[in-house]
Image: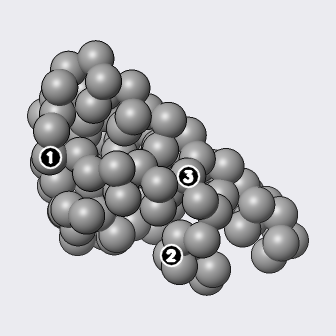
């Protein structure tokens, strides 16, 4: 599995910076780098989805929201791999995010 990719792929990596999207102000978010390609856009959507999960007050609801985001990322990566032939997207990475066992969803 590729731990970091482009400007948005990787734990704590948002917009080309070592930050979590949900920790930024609206002004700081405006300065983030755009996705570099369709694969990176999958990660951007994932970060945006995760940031939306912080609105959930209940920890269980937050975790369920993040699991949904992970599954959406899995589907997006699978689509990108199939449509654009990104051979470096491993089936393990697709499975990992689709499995609901992502350890980063547990905080």
| Quadrant showing the N terminus | bottom left
| Quadrant showing the C terminus | bottom right
Q: CA distance from mark 2 to mark 1?
A: 22 Å
Whether pointer 3 and pointer 2 mark residues with C-beta atoms closer than 8 Å, the reply is no
**Numbered tag placed on residue 104 in the rendering:** 2
Which label lies toward us, 3 or 2?
Answer: 3
Residue at position x 46%, y 67% in the image: 23
Where 28 falls versus 59 (above or below)? Answer: above
What secondary structure is marked by label 3? helix
What secondary structure is marked by label 1? loop
Extreme front residue here? 91
Q: Which residue lies under the disc numbered 1? A: 88
Picture coordinates of residue 79, whole percent (x, y): 39, 26
Q: Which residue lies under the disc numbered 3? A: 98
Q: Quadrant of residue 105?
A: bottom right
Residue at position x 55%, y 52% in the image: 98
What secondary structure is marked by label 2? helix
Residue at position x 15%, y 38% in the image: 87
Which label lies toward us, 2 or 1?
Answer: 1
């Amino acid at each position: 599995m590729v731990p970091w990719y482009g400007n948005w792929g990787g734990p704590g990596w948002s917009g080309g910076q070592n930050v979590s999207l949900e920790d930024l102000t609206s002004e700081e978010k405006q300065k983030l780098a755009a996705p570099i390609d369709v694969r990176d856009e999958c990660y951007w959507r994932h970060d945006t989805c995760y940031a939306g999960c912080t609105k959930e007050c209940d920890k269980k609801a937050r975790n369920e929201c993040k699991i949904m985001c992970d599954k959406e990322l899995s589907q997006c990566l699978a689509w990108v791999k199939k449509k654009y032939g990104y051979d470096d997207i491993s089936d393990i990475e697709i499975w990992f995010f689709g499995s609901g066992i992502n350890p980063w969803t547990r905080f």
